[in-house]
Image: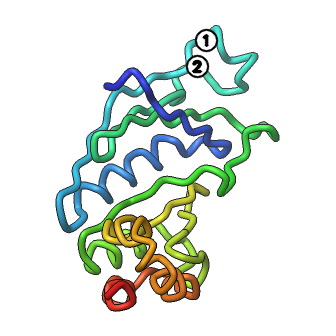
Amino acid sequence: MSKLITCIWFANNDGEDAANYYVDTFNSAPGEHSAKMGDITKNPKASEEVSGRPEGSIMTAEYELDGICFMALNGGPVDQFKLTGATSYIVECETQKEIDFFWEKLSADPDGGQCGWCTDKFGITWQVVPRLLDEMMRDPQKAEAVTKAFLPMKKLDLDAIRKAGE
């Protein structure tokens, strides 16, 4: 695993379920995506009092999505560690099929979100975007029309974005 790992605090102790869900999602996605589970650690007896979690329960689940390392930590309900949309994970997609797939898997509310942003059933925020969007936004001659096209969208429409950039 990488020396830089994103650790995500799960208040409801569903970190291992989330890790497995993300690994399954990325491994079954169309296009070139890969994922794998890493180490699972369990709470030792010494942590019971401080963590409130019983000995032997899952403490962390490590996983990798498209080469990026993550750790799901079953930290319990602590107010300062609530998940928000201030941090999101971008999934760059080559095709509309990939966009549709990830939107379906990662959006707990298909009618929610804006501009490709969605929040999954675990509370993690994602941006499901076509790779082409970044390229078009860097071109000042295309950025205005492309922005007007994608701003009203929830799930992004690759063909509409592509046409706006032409």
Amino acid type assigned to the residue bearing label 1 in the image: Lys
Residue linked to disc 1 = 45
Q: Are marks 2 and 1 in contact (CB under 8 Å)?
A: yes
Residue type of the residue flagged with mark 2: Glu
Residue count near mark 1 (Cα–Cα under 10 Å), binned few <14, some 14–19, many ≥20 = few
- What crowding class fits label 2: few (fewer than 14 Cα within 10 Å), some (14-19), or many (20 or more)? some
Where is residue 108, by image quadrant?
bottom right
Point out the tag, 2 or 1, that comes first from the N-terminus: 1
Q: Is residue 31 above or below residue 150?
A: above
Look at 62% across and 38% down and name the residue there: 9
* Residue 49 visible in rendering: yes
What secondary structure is found at the residue carrying circle 1?
helix
Foreground residue among 15 and 80: 80
Quadrant holding the N terminus: top left
Q: Nearer the viewer, residue 30 or 92?
A: 92
Question: Where in the figure is residue 164, as x and y percent of width and height?
Answer: 39, 89
Q: Count the labels in the image.
A: 2
Q: Nearer the viewer, residue 137 or 96?
A: 137
- Where residue 19 sits, quadrant-wise, is top left
| Residue 154 x/y as whole percent | 53, 82
Residue at 56%, 55% in the rendered image: 124
Mark 2 lies on residue: 55
Residue at 56% x, 33% y is 73
C-alpha separation, residue under disc 2 versus residue under disc 1:
5 Å
Measured from the top left, where is residue 67 in percent x and y? 28, 40
Q: Is residue 112 above or below residue 72?
A: below
Element at label 2: loop
